[in-house]
Amino acid sequence: MIKVRYFLLPFIVLFLSACTSSSIGKNVSENKVAKTSGLSKQINSTINNIEGLTEANNKIQDSSKDSNNKVSRKVIVIDPGHADKANLQKEQLAPGSTEMKIKDGGGAEGIVTKTPEYIVNMAISMKLRDILQKREYTVIMTKTSNSVSLGNIERAEIGNKAKADLVIRIHADSSDDTKVTGASMLVPAPINSNTSEIYSISKKYGTEILNIYCNEMKLENRGVVEHSDMTGFNWSKVPVVLIEVGFLSNPSEDKLLSNISYENKIANALADGIYNALN
C-alpha cells in the first residue's frame, strides 16, 4: 500500500488527490502475501500505482521548477521491516545468484516489553512518513499494515519502480549481550552491477543520516556497515540504506523504543538526517 501526499498548486492538488485517493483506497483490500514465485498480486498492484503516481509527480515537477531549473521535490521510499508473521519462502539473494534466502525471519522482540520488532518499525515509519510529507517530500510506503509480509525482492522493486532518491529501511537491532546499545547503518556492498552503481551514494547518505541521528538521539554511533548478504540491497537499483535504530535486547533501549514520544524523536532525527543527506 502506498500513501502519497503532494503539496501543489491548488487546482492540481484537488484533481490529483481525488484520483490517487480512489486508487489507493481500492488497493487496500487487494493486498496479498507474496507467492512462491514471481511478484505477488499485492506487489503488482503496488507497482502499478507507483508508476501512475511517479508519472503524475514528474508532470508536477516539470511545472514547478524554480528559476535555476532545479526540482526540489525528492521521492523517499520508507520500508518498515518485518511483519506479524515470518515468511520462510525463499528467493534469490541477488540477480543471477544460485544462493537462496528466506524472505523474512520474523525480527526481534523487546527483552523487557516483549514488543515485536515489526510494531516498533511500523510506528517509527508512519511517523517518519508524516514528517517527510510535511517537509514536501513525495513519500511511498512499501506497506502500511503489519499483516502484509513482503519478500526483499518485492521491497526493492517498489523503490526501483518509484525511481526513488532514497529507500530507507527501518529496523531495530538485537544482541546476545544485553549491555550493547546504540545505532548502526547498513549499506550495500558493491558486488554486482546494481550495487556497484548505488554503493557510493548509499554509503554517503547512510553516513550522513546515521551521524545526525546519533547526535540528536545521544546514542552511541556503531558505524556504517557494508553488506553483500542482503537480498533487498542486492536487487536495488536506487540508493538504499537500512538503519538499526536501537537495541531491543537492551532493557533501557527496549523501553524507549516502545515510547511514543521517543519514537517521535527518532522520526524527527531521521527526517533531519535525510534532509541533510539529500540536500
Image (spheres, helix red, strand yellow):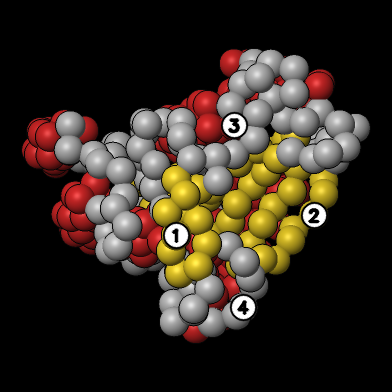
Q: Note whether 3 is above or below 204 in the view shown.
A: above
In the rendered structure, the answer to whether residue 83 lies left or right of residue 147 reads right
Alpha carbon of mark 3 to alpha carbon of mark 1: how far?
Answer: 21 Å
Q: Is residue 6 visible?
A: no
Which is closer to the viewer, label 3 or label 2?
3
Alpha carbon of mark 3 to alpha carbon of mark 2: how far?
Answer: 21 Å
**Image quadrant containing the C terminus:** bottom right
Which is closer to the viewer, label 3 or label 4?
3
Of the numbered discs 3 and 2, the one sitting upstream in the chain is 3
Q: Give the residue at mark 4.
A: 190
Alpha carbon of mark 4 to alpha carbon of mark 1: how far?
Answer: 23 Å
Q: Are marks 4 and 2 in contact (CB under 8 Å)?
A: no
Q: Give the residue at mark 2.
A: 223
Mark number for residue 90?
1
Q: Report the front residue among 120 and 34.
A: 34
**Image quadrant containing the N terminus:** top left
